[in-house]
Image (cartoon, helix red, strand yellow):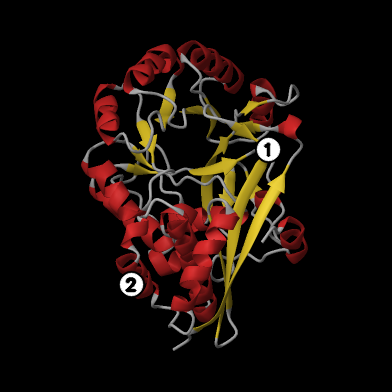
Amino acid sequence: MPTIERLGFIGLEYAMPPEKAFGMSRAIGNRRLGGLIELETDTGVRGVGEAFGDPRVTAAYFQMIEPLFRGRSIYDFDHVEAGIRNRMYHLGAQNQLTACLSGINLALHDAIGRTHGVRACDLIGGCATTRLPVYASTGFFSKDPTNQLEHQLAAVKAHPYVGAKIKIGRGPQDDAARCRLAREMLGDDALLIVDVNGNYTVDMALACIRAIERYDIHWLEEPLPPADLRGYAELRARSPIPVAAGEAHYTLRDFKQLIDGRCVDIVQPSIPTVGGLTEARRIAVMAHAANLRVSPHAWGGAVGLAAALHLVASLPVTPHGDNVPYPTLVEYDMSDNPLRTNLLSQPLVLDGGHLLLPSGPGLGVTLDRAVVDRYRVC
């Protein structure tokens, strides 16, 4: 039985000039952060995973839990993870501990897949497709006068994406103006998604919805802070626009409350945040059992994006038969982020508005060591 011989953590940071800062309704910034978990088995097989968030915080959690995984079977993640949760329950789940566990879980899926010569998607449900439709995640608020909404949407038009997501959340009038411009530039056929990043209360979200409904919005993402579950349920019951959330929710327990409370129409687990592929697949199954759509949040590095492709490839088309109104979509971040675009020796392939599932075993990706070293901070 292969065991975990070595675990390592690499913290990454990319800093752009302050005048190029971009972001969302709550804030803008000029840094992209993340972390990698590297794992090697006693048989020499290696795996890599991604952990969301500030790498300096993740590194501290990694030092605490790494000894508990070393020497264990590569199949023992659930048992080790449960032991950590049970002993460290005071720490909660909505933190970098869960992100660190996510990275370890992804690295184990990568290593198990490479051990057996199969893809990660085959380990969690099989492979329905190797071409995953994506929407462009763009339309950020920006300090750069050459990178405003119209410039970002012009880049979207150069590719046949299913649609695009833009940032809103600075007030209903501004929301309407941005949606009007996006609809004019993208045309009537493209899906238009908007993201508030939790900056509204229920009354403000309803005012936003009244202002933007005319622009045929495919979904309204994170209109409220993640803890306002009652507000989400109230808003969803009153909104003519589908509501989506999940990037700021952690583990199956958070998502059970979202789903059981009928708080959202689209469930958005972020794989390097929620606990890895194991937890993300559980969340997707629970969402499907409640007849809700799933679309993973994927706004981080290349390894996390590859994991999102494997998750979506593994999901059955449900509840549909021959006719699928909307395919399960993968988020494709178009912002300046070499941790996504340059980190792999063979970048993920974008073809005709689709990302291609990596064909190799495990996650099917290999790090470019020179790029890793360039952006390593811990």
Q: Nearer the viewer, residue 48 or 29?
A: 29
The image quadrant where one finds the C terminus is bottom right
Question: In this rendering, does residue 128 appear at all?
Answer: no
Q: Are marks 1 and 2 in contact (CB under 8 Å)?
A: no
- Residue that badge 1 annotates: 30
Q: Give residue 347's position: percent from left, percent from top.
A: 68, 56
- Residue that badge 2 annotates: 83
Residue displayed at 61% across by 19% down: 185
Q: Is residue 192 left or right of residue 34?
A: left
Residue count near mark 2 (Cα–Cα under 10 Å), binned few <14, some 14–19, many ≥20: few
Residue count near mark 1 (Cα–Cα under 10 Å), binned few <14, some 14–19, many ≥20: some
The amino acid type, in three-letter code, at marker 2 is Gly
The quarter holding residue 248 reads top left
Q: Give residue 362's position: percent from left, percent from top.
A: 53, 69
The image quadrant where one finds the N terminus is bottom left
Secondary structure, mark 2, is helix
The quarter holding residue 230 reads top left
The amino acid type, in three-letter code, at marker 1 is Asn
Q: Give residue 8's position: percent from left, percent from top.
A: 59, 72
Residue displayed at 34% across by 52% down: 284
Disc 1 to disc 2, C-alpha distance: 38 Å
